[in-house]
Image: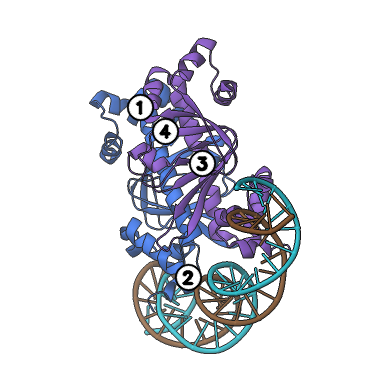
Chain colours: A blue, B purple, C cyan, D brown
Amino acid sequence: MSNKLRQHIEEIVPLTDQEFQYVLSHFSFRKFKKRQYLIQQGDYVRNDFFILSGLVKSCSTDQIGKSHVVFIASENWWVSDPEAYHNQTPATVDIDCVEETETGYISLENREKLCRELRKLEYFFLRKTTAGYIASQKRILMLISANARERYQFMLLQYPGLLQRVPKSVIASYLGVTRETLSRLST
Amino acid sequence: MSNKLRQHIEEIVPLTDQEFQYVLSHFSFRKFKKRQYLIQQGDYVRNDFFILSGLVKSCSTDQIGKSHVVFIASENWWVSDPEAYHNQTPATVDIDCVEETETGYISLENREKLCRELRKLEYFFLRKTTAGYIASQKRILMLISANARERYQFMLLQYPGLLQRVPKSVIASYLGVTRETLSRLST
DNA sequence: CCTAGGTCGTGATTTTTATCACGGACAATC
DNA sequence: GATTGTCCGTGATAAAAATCACGACCTAGG
């Protein structure tokens, strides 16, 4: 299972066996069942999770109790509450499993230690964060410029695989429309 | 003027005079007039710009010719077309000046060189990128969960200073609503 | 086998927002 | 000092999406 993590890192920086063993020693592993929480609103967020298998969603609940899907992550994605993790503030989202999910995770302390000791890893995280930022910008452009149908097509293009695995209501919320509107698009 | 850049970096990593001089040697400086372009759609994007004074907006034009404000940046913000800059692809946005604007800018090559040679700078850019990612996530949550009035209030909270300096039509586009809808909110 | 919960489609209606159109205020330019 | 362009508000109308409501289907669990 840790092989997946290695492959993922080596897409950006090559590692010797020894280096990877060292990296690995900073990670822990945990399996979650469907509907189980990785993070709950208000939690102190210790870890950033790498998804080895399965699928999770990150949701924010507004004042009137409505839930909004901020993020969806499956294999080879990282997921956490970034603000809570990096700034050590309470979690503002719930992250729970849409499918049974296996994760490798790393604490902020371990991540910072690892980055200091192994230059390559700092570079790896910089690249990953940059990629995440670029993806966010694309989603923002989609949200400010596209109607419901175009948003769905964006999803089809960007994450075709997810559509079969995630309930439509979750897709709808991720796209910022209602379940009903999404359901009526085919017409 | 380079003082502003130093202060900005030193909010995250302290620098000796010598280190800062070295950093500075990787930057260039340029002043732009109102309505002048920093980057135009299709350009090869060589630089990431740090705004010393003034204000710029980044706009994407869709298929039917409508322009959408992807980003607004004033003093102490960095701005570029991140995807084009990092992945060396043609620019997908126009970045132009809302006010006369002074910038310090750094090429990707210089940035990578500087990061390799001065560890602190790689850390600095990681922190900046992370902060940008977190801000994007907040904007996404706003866009999927808030109506026009709530979006405007988000703007009031996050960037109160910008409202006086930027035309309402630009604010509206940034929030993903029309100029007319924004104008009618007070009622 | 039956039930409860989750998922999805769809109709009827209301609400929100976009679109189109116009005029006024103001500043910059010649 | 007339003119042009930009910015902003607002009315009338159309379009899009949200809301509320219902029933069908499926499957996991007692």
Q: Are marks 2 and 4 in contact (CB under 8 Å)?
A: no
Q: Nearer the viewer, residue A9 or B185?
A: B185
Q: Earlier in the sequence, mark 4 or mark 3?
A: 3
Q: Quadrant of residue B107?
A: top left
- Dividing the picture into quadrants, the one containing residue A36 is bottom left
Q: Which residue is mark 4?
A: B47
Residue on which disc 2 sits:
A179
**In screen coordinates, is D2 left or right of D4?**
right
Q: Are marks 2 and 3 on the same chain?
A: no
Residue type for callout 4? Asn
Residue carrying label 3: B36
Q: CA distance from mark 4 to mark 3?
A: 16 Å
**Amino acid type of the residue that numbered disc 1 sits on in the rendered structure:** Glu
Q: Which three-letter amino acid code belongs to the residue tagged 2?
A: Arg
Residue A19 vs B32, above or below: the answer is above
Residue labelled with disc 1: B109
Chain letter, disc 2 residue: A
C-alpha gap between disc 2 and disc 4? 42 Å
Residue at 73% across, 62% down: B186
Q: Which residue is the extreme one toward the top?
A: B18
Q: Bin the neighbour count of mark 2 within 10 Å (Cα to Cα): few under 14, some 14-19, many 20 and up.
A: some
N-terminal of the pair, mark 4 or mark 1, is 4
- Same subunit, labels 4 and 1: the answer reads yes
Which tag, 3 or 1, sits closer to the chain's start? 3
